[in-house]
Image (cartoon, helix red, strand yellow):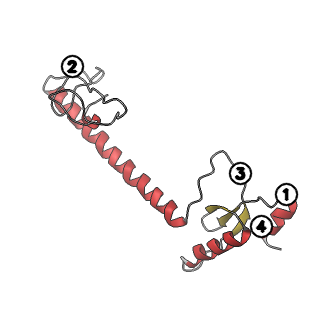
């Protein structure tokens, strides 16, 4: 009896059961929410074949949670993971650039202390960012600014 069959027998799983692919080597469900055990086992075989030595992933009964992700392939999960890492890196670079710009303006007397509220555009000095309705990250609406929200410290 497979692990999934044992789990199904012990929990009284009905025909609406969803299946996940659990990989012991990664210690997590690598692909989730298949409509059948067969489909999950096929995905597990594809997952296992990507590694040398091959992983030993297999189908397991899906246990619902509040954080169930949509059905994603491993390639889609990897793409999201890479996007998250790249965007986090970009955000860190932006925070660093903003801190340097703020310090540069403080040095020349634009701001009195690091604790002051500072909404001035870090690029041109307009007094505060003015948002476009329904597009909060659009360029500043001030006539002589037009810089992005990222150029304003808020």
CA separation in Å, label 4 and label 1: 10 Å
Q: Secondary structure at mark 1?
A: helix
Left/right of residue 12 with respect to residue 100 in the rendered view: right
Task: State which tag comes first along the sequence, 4 or 3.
Answer: 4
Give the answer, above or below, for where 71 lies relative to 147: below
Measuring from the top left, give residue 35's x and y in whole percent: 70, 63
Task: State which tag comes first along the sequence, 4 or 1.
Answer: 4
Left/right of residue 30 with respect to residue 102 in the rendered view: right
Q: Secondary structure at mark 4?
A: helix
CA separation in Å, label 1 and label 2: 66 Å
Q: Which residue is mark 3?
A: 64
Q: Answer with the quarter of the image where residue 60 lies.
A: bottom right
Q: Which residue is mark 2?
A: 112
CA separation in Å, label 2 and label 4: 65 Å
Q: Quadrant of the C terminus?
A: top left
The residue at the point 83 percent across, 74 percent down is: 1
In contact (CB < 8 Å): disc 4 and disc 1:
no
Q: Which mark is residue 4?
A: 4
CA separation in Å, label 1 and label 3: 13 Å
The residue at the point 62 percent across, 71 percent down is: 43
Left/right of residue 82 with respect to residue 29 in the rendered view: left
Residue count near mark 1 (Cα–Cα under 10 Å), binned few <14, some 14–19, many ≥20:
few
Q: Nearer the viewer, mark 3 or mark 2?
A: 3
Residue count near mark 2 (Cα–Cα under 10 Å), binned few <14, some 14–19, many ≥20:
few
Task: State which tag comes first along the sequence, 1 or 3.
Answer: 1
CA separation in Å, label 4 and label 3: 15 Å
Task: State which tag comes first along the sequence, 2 or 4.
Answer: 4
């Amino acid at each position: 009896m497979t692990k999934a069959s044992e789990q199904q027998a012990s929990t009284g799983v009905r025909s609406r059961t969803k299946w996940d692919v659990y990989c012991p080597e990664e210690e997590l469900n690598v692909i989730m929410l298949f409509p059948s055990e067969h489909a999950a086992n096929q995905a597990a075989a594809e997952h296992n074949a990507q590694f040398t030595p091959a992983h030993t992933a297999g189908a397991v009964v899906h246990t619902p949670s509040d954080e169930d992700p949509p059905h994603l392939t491993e390639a889609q999960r990897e793409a999201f993971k890479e996007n998250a890492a790249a965007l986090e890196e970009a955000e860190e670079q932006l925070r660093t650039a903003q801190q340097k710009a703020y310090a540069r303006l403080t040095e020349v007397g634009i701001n009195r202390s690091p604790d002051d509220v500072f909404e001035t555009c870090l690029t041109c000095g307009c007094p505060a960012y003015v948002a476009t309705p329904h597009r909060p990250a659009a360029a500043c609406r001030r006539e002589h600014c037009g810089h992005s929200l990222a150029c304003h410290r808020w």
